Amino acid sequence: MTLEGGADMRQVAARLSAMGSVSGLDGWLFGQAASASTMSTSTLLVVLGLGGLYALIGVINSVVIAGAERRSEFAAARAAGLTRRQVVLIALMESWAVAASGLLLGLLAAAGTLTAALAVTSGVTGVAMVAVPWPLAGGVLAGVLLATGVTNVLTTRAALRPALVSPLRTRE
């Protein structure tokens, strides 16, 4: 609802408040965002939970396969003088770099979606507004790095178990 030209907003708000609560556009939008935030967060948790579980299985699978294929590389690093701990740490840093790259690409994809949502919101209401669940986003970031790190450390340690020279042997 808009006011006619020359109407006093305070006077109109005072008369309308006798019938119920009155707020400006900004107040109404923030109120709507707060009430919709609970439903949006619940829906997002379900979708993100299912997609995240599938992605977690993929991440763990990829890290295990990559670590298992690097036995000879780990053995060569050990033969070059690195300790087991140094090899594990290097592999961990590599896996976190890959995970961070994936998270950055995911963030760029989410930013594109968020930009589209802001454009639609702005077109409908005249004000661009979105509520980002930062604790949830931080939890996803920490969960990805934790799962990748734990899986990588366990896989690298398992790959380092055989005798140092056995993975270096050539097969004919």
Image: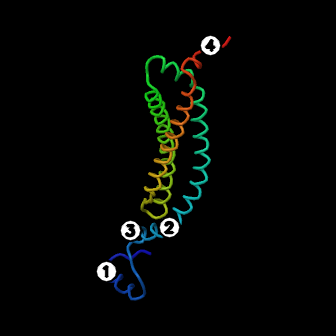
Identify residue type, mark 4: Thr
Query: Of helix, strand and loop, which one carries label 4?
Result: loop
Residue furthest top as drawn: 172
Q: Which residue is mark 3?
A: 26
**Circle 1 Cα neighbour tier, 10 Å, few/some/many (<14 / 14–19 / ≥20):** few
Disc number lying in front (4 or 3): 4
Residue 21 pos. (x, y %): 40, 82
Relative vertical location of residue 19 with respect to residue 57 in this rendering, above or below: below
Query: Are discs 4 and 3 less than 8 Å apart at CB?
Result: no
Of badges 4 and 2, the one in the foreground is 4
Quickly name the residue at label 1.
Answer: 10
The numbered mark, 3 or 1, whose residue comes first in the sequence reads 1
Q: Amino acid at mark 1?
A: Arg
Q: Along the polypeptide, which appears first: circle 4 or circle 3?
A: 3
Q: Is residue 60 above or below residue 17?
A: above
Front-lying residue, 157 or 148: 157
Number of marks in the rendered image: 4
Mark 3, other Cα within 10 Å: few <14 / some 14–19 / many ≥20: few
According to the image, label 2 marks what residue?
Answer: 36
Give the residue type at disc 3.
Asp
Where disc 2 sits, the SS reads helix
Amino acid type assigned to the residue bearing label 2 in the image: Ala
Reading the image, the residue beneath label 4 is 170
- Image quadrant in which you'd find residue 59: top right
Residues 153 and 47: in front is: 153
In front: label 3 or label 1: 3
Q: Earlier in the sequence, mark 1 or mark 2?
A: 1
> Separation of disc 1 and disc 4 at Cα?
87 Å
What's the distance in space between the residues labelled 3 and 2, CA to CA? Answer: 15 Å
Quadrant the C terminus occupies? top right
Q: Position of residue 150 (x, y in %)?
A: 51, 41
